[in-house]
Amino acid sequence: MSSLFTALKIVRDLGPGWALKRLKLAAEVRLGIVGRELPFRDWEFRRADWAVLDGTRNCNSTAQALTKFFFFSEETSFARSIGNAVSHQADRLLSGEWPFFSRQWLQLGFPPDWHFNALAGTRLDDNCHWSEFALNAIDDVKFVWEPNRFSVAYLLARAYAGLGDERFPEAFWSLTEDWAEKNPPNRGVNWASGQEVALRMMAWCFALHAFVKSPSSTDDRVAKLLCMIETHGNRIAGFINYGLSQRNNHGIGEAVGLFTIGILFPEFQRSTEWLRLGRHLIQSQIHEQVYADGSYIQHSLNYQRVFIDYLVWALRLGELNNAPFSKESYQILGRAVHFMLPMCDPTTGRMPNYGSNDGSLVLPLSSCDFVDYRPSLQAAYFLVHHEFYFGKGEWDEQWEWLFARRSAQEARTRNGLPDVETQKTQSDSGYLKLVAAEGYAMLRAARYADRPSQADQLHLDLWWRGENIVCDAGTYLYNGPSPWTNALATTSVHNTITVGNQDQMTRAGRFLWVDWAQADWREYEIGNSCGAIEAWHDGYSRIGAMHRRSIAYLQEKDIWIVVDDVCGSRARDVRLHWLFANYPYQWESNELRLALRTPVGEFQGSVYCSTPNITRLITGGEVCFSNASNVSEFNERIYGWRSQYYGCKEPAISLAVETQGTLPVRFVTVLAPSTSKLINIDDKFVEVEASNERFALSLLPVGSERICSRG
């Protein structure tokens, strides 16, 4: 696609106003305007009068004020129960190991080289202005930024609260002093992202209050850190329009950063300005970024958690400092939380790994795994409702830090727990949840009002007994070595149909799609305990095809029958893809049947194709079965992988069935526990037996008003 044609489509899809704003910002960088407004300079360390008394910070400076944080040291006694759980991780940090994306630990040294790229094994220039970096040319800059977020400050604070070991506050101060020496204002890549600056500043604020009574927290160290925080505020405010132009987590994160500095440090010269601006931007951003049903603008469940954590931080600080946000702000947060809860498994806290997932965890304040969403959702639910959604558990630590435990414990005693909802569908956003006896399916059928992050219309996630049987591949890397340049955002790795070897949308960059595929759907009942939903999208209309997916499900038996029709009249390659979690399996090539031995029981998937087909089974980029001789070596490398944590991938089972010929084409898939017996599967009739009962489903011809009817 020509550059001009692509640019015109970008303007069409994102609007001329957005395009002009981005051109203006790019010109400011290229012409050196940003470099002149935020120039190199030295730290301006100065003395500051700073004290904390009974949870209130007394600022004896030009602006007399009292400010409150989430806790003070006497209120962290709850952390004694978790001290041993985090002390081992804190010791690893002191030995030079650093956590990356809540999963892997890499040896960087203590202190680390703050400009080292652990993915590429190279070091970035630390002597040029941050605006001069071409971030796309760096092998995933996130591996440089991750240690610089200072998420380890939360770890050290938690370990200190639990054990009282003075090594941990001393470690924090040593790291901040070294960081300041190696990262002068606006020099180096660690100043390039306003959101990264805000996250680092938030972590520093948390540690500052956690370590306030430690002997390591000398007046000189505190004064220097306050100067560093103020300088971070100047950086955020100086180029916040870029973060806002992205219309995603960057904008809300930078707004929360300004609000935090403004409300906690009224002695700063621009604190009043930052407080007002941050507050205004937070309220405008949450209106823009949360849809009416509570789903999030980035079409990502992890980024929605990022948004929720940001908002809980800001709203709670506002409450504590007599600057509450509007009632509507709480209502919007409540919508976002209530959207997430029905998809969160109450026993594991896991959710579908849907949409882009860069491994961000704004508030790492519990020992729960990264994939456990309960810490964030519990704290947010409590902020909105003053009661709890989940029972007691280690996920409570996050609200213990944010609410100093006392009011939270009172609410639990007073109100008990609300009933867990079993929401079936969420129509506004196109996240369609179908509930069965021991599991559920999530089908995505979106009508995009804002730019999509992945080309994944009609993707299906399937959960059974708490296991994510049919899963999303995740993200892995945004900008790694070939082929890992956000490769898992493409259509072909999702559980959907690919037509003509093309994505459903046209890719215009690593994070940008044009020609947005738009979907619609309807739901109906087939008979007792059997529901059906049909969805379709227009992404392939540009090549004369339409994908329509029908799902009939026996709710009491957890049997799912998926019918994929591709309508049209031209000759096209059509490919159905399923990604299964990496369980021990048995493959029956003649029947196109995959039998899985999961930890909670045996499960099966069977596929029928109405025309001759090519079938491939790939695990971890390696072909395990293929009845075709022409397998693309490059393409196979991205299949059969699953990434639950950014920067880490694990094998999964990729099953692809492809046919070549004239449309229309039909695929039929049956997904069910292995206790069910598949009697018949073809393009007209499916019969399944379960618990000595038979269920028959008739499939009407391709193009019929509805596909499924009771046989």
Image (cartoon, grey):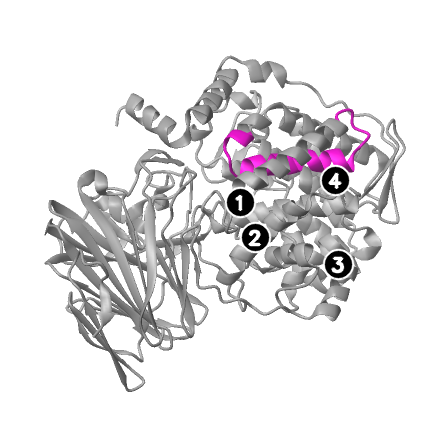
Q: Where is residue 512 drawn, in percent x and y?
A: 38, 35
Disc on res. 290? 1
Q: Secondary structure at mark 2?
A: helix
Looking at the image, do the residues carrying marks 2 and 1 touch, with CB atoms under 8 Å apart?
Answer: yes
Circle nearer the N terminus (3, 4) = 3
Disc on res. 335? 2
* Cα–Cα span, label 4 and label 2: 39 Å
Disc on res. 173? 4
- Magenta part of the chain: 243-270
Q: Secondary structure at mark 4?
A: helix
Q: Main secondary structure of the magenta part?
A: helix
Please state which of the two labelled residues, at mark 1 or mark 3, is closer to the viewer. 1
Circle nearer the N terminus (1, 4) = 4
Identity of the amino acid at label 1? Val
Identity of the amino acid at label 3? Gly
- Verify whether residue 260 appears in magenta: yes
Tell me if mark 2 has few (under 14), some (14-19) or many (20+) residues whose alpha carbon lies within 10 angstroms of its own: some
